[in-house]
Amino acid sequence: TAGIKANSILMKISGIEMDKTCKVVVDMSLQVHPHSSVFAIGDNTWCFDAESQMAAPAMVQTAIDQGAIAARNIINSIKGRPLEKYRYKGVKFIIPLGGKFGIADLGKVHLVGFTAWCLKQLTFLKYFATILPKFKALRFWCGEQKVFHKND
């Protein structure tokens, strides 16, 4: 992450098509050309959608979405089924701006103010629950909410 140039190890792989920034060129099913049985995802790939005239941005959300499609396409390839096409869905975000104020763009839903800030707090709770036991995560999160309340 945090780079604009693809990993230099890609240049050592012979026989794959690269773009001008040394990213592996993939089609909309995320197949590496000319190797139809190889798939690639993420910020080391150049995935251009001719329909929208946009390339998929080098972001973690893109890589996660592409990973799910690539996994299904590997299975589809093995089973002789048609491959799914990747479509960039846009970036969704929630940004706390302090003072219990935030902004959120969730695709079709746009929030500003306290509601967006609350939503971000819930994402923190969800994250804590993935790294801590559930009760401990809730207790930790509630402690954070007390700090926010005291700052009013």
Image (cartoon, helix red, strand yellow):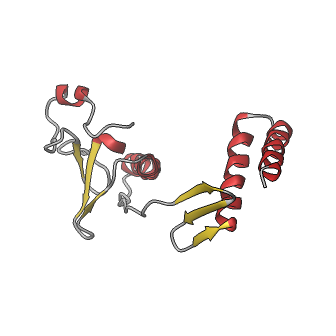
Residue most extreme to the bottom? 108
Q: Is residue 85 left or right of residue 46?
A: right
Report the residue at 26% width, 63% height from top: 54
Q: Residue at x 18, y 41 (%)?
A: 21
- Residue 61 in sight from this viewpoint: yes
- Left or right: where 149 falls relative to 84: right
Which quarter of the rendering shows the C terminus?
Answer: bottom right
Count the numbered circles shown: 0
Q: Is residue 37 positioned above or below 8 on the image? A: below
Residue 39 appearing in the image: no
- Residue 99 location in percent, x, y? 67, 57
Residue 36 drawn above or below residue 104: above
* 37 with respect to 115 (left or right): left
Please give left or right for residue 118 compared with residue 95 in the image: right
Task: Give me the residue at 38% from left, 57% from top.
Answer: 81
Q: Quadrant of residue 134?
A: top right
Say which of 36 and 142 sits in front.
142
Quarter of the view holding residue 48 = bottom left
Q: Can you tell which quarter of the image residue 43 is in?
A: top left
x, y percentage for residue 29?
32, 55
User: Which quarter shows the N terminus?
Assistant: top left
> Of residues 98 and 57, which is closer to you in this image?
98
**Residue 113's spot in the image, x, y percent?**
64, 68
Along the line of sight, the residue nearer the viewer: 95 or 90: 95
Q: Whole-percent x and y of residue 39?
A: 32, 43
